Amino acid sequence: MNEFLNWVSQPWPWYIAGPMIGLTVPILLLLGNRSFGISSSLRHICAVCVPAKIPFFQYSWKEETWNLLFVTGILLGGVIAAMFLSNPETIVIAESTQRDLKALGITNFQNLLPAEIFSWENLFTLKGLFFFVIGGFLVGFGTRYAGGCTSGHAIMGISNLQWPSVVATMFFMIGGLVMTHFLMPFIMNWVGF
Amino acid sequence: MLLKENDTLAVDKNTNLTAKVKQGERGLSLLKYLYVGIVFGIIFVKGEIISWFRIQEMFRFQSFFMYGVIGSAILVGMVSIQLIKRFSIKTINGQAIKIADKKFNKGQIYGGFIFGLGWAITGACPGPLFAQIGTGFTVVIVSFLSAVAGTWVYGRFAEKLPN
């Protein structure tokens, strides 16, 4: 058992993690005709908590309870992985990426997320405003405007040969490239790195 | 609100058979999606897909990792859907499997671009946001709440945006 735990506690290579994520597509279909998608959970949360008579949030969200349970599961999975299966070693990040990020002011490469950004102390600073508030807002606004995220479009949509999903995925990438290469160097400097 | 929902439920049960089948999936039978989610969350963490650094590697083209993850996930999804269609495989409750088509609109361009900007900042699409919180980066709760706010603002102005 211990050996097994040690073994699963290693980081999983892409050729294990990727196909397992892909298998979620048929599993959800076979379990109950559910199309894989995660960002719609944010819409359901709005519909449950603050529908405010907005037509976009007037629908039978109870039929979508499965989706809210699914994302609750993802959160619990995170808890379980961190408590019982966490990797004792530090994450291995490409040398070139470390070099680029060092130039931007990131020096701590020990965790899955950079501690210099993702801490509560940053919440009421410009760092917090950019990385949590603005970043989160763009994710929520953009995914809904695009009608899906990496799961709904890039994985589910392209798996089902939907060309609009290919378009969406291309623009996910373009947005990410523009932010990483053109905007982030200025913004990181501005927020105090 | 609750009463109203229950009323429609009762009507559906008497009049609409398909609705009845769907409504069979309530209460405990929905728990299976929680379990799938848990496994999925563990994969997210152990595959290090929730890592801000992995997303940076991806957008800098400095590692094959995320391309391998997403590419192989699509491949497995694609083969599975083809098999389901080819052999008309049904759900465990015997329903025919139906997948809605995605309709093109300009939102996939504008919204996709906006999400891409956010993806590079947070290092997370919506799924990993949940898993990041679970692993103990609790400050990501703020990003999550902001994402809910972003979705709400989209919903509020959806009709006024180019589509």
Image: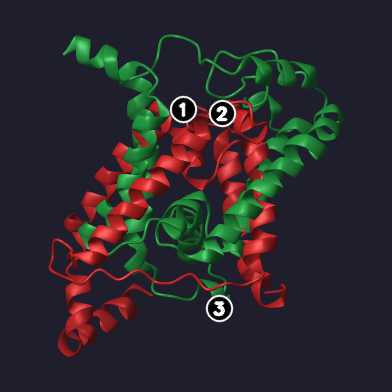
Chain colours: A green, B red
Outermost residue to the bottom:
B15
C-alpha span from label 3 to label 2:
38 Å
C-alpha span from label 3 to label 1:
38 Å
Quadrant of the image containing the N terminus of chain A: top left
Residue type beneath disc 1: Glu
Report the chain holding disc 1: B
Tell me whether the residue at label 2 lies in contact with that at label 1, contact meaning CB atoms closer than 8 angstroms.
yes
Residue type beneath disc 2: Arg
Q: Is residue B150 above or below residue A124?
A: below
Residue assigned mark 2: B54
Q: Is residue A98 above or below residue A24?
A: above
| Residue in view at x 60 percent, y 40 percent | B142
Q: Is residue B32 above or below residue A147?
A: above
Residue assigned mark 1: B48
Tell me whether the residue at label 3 lies in contact with that at label 1, contact meaning CB atoms closer than 8 angstroms.
no
Q: Is residue A139 above or below residue B2?
A: above
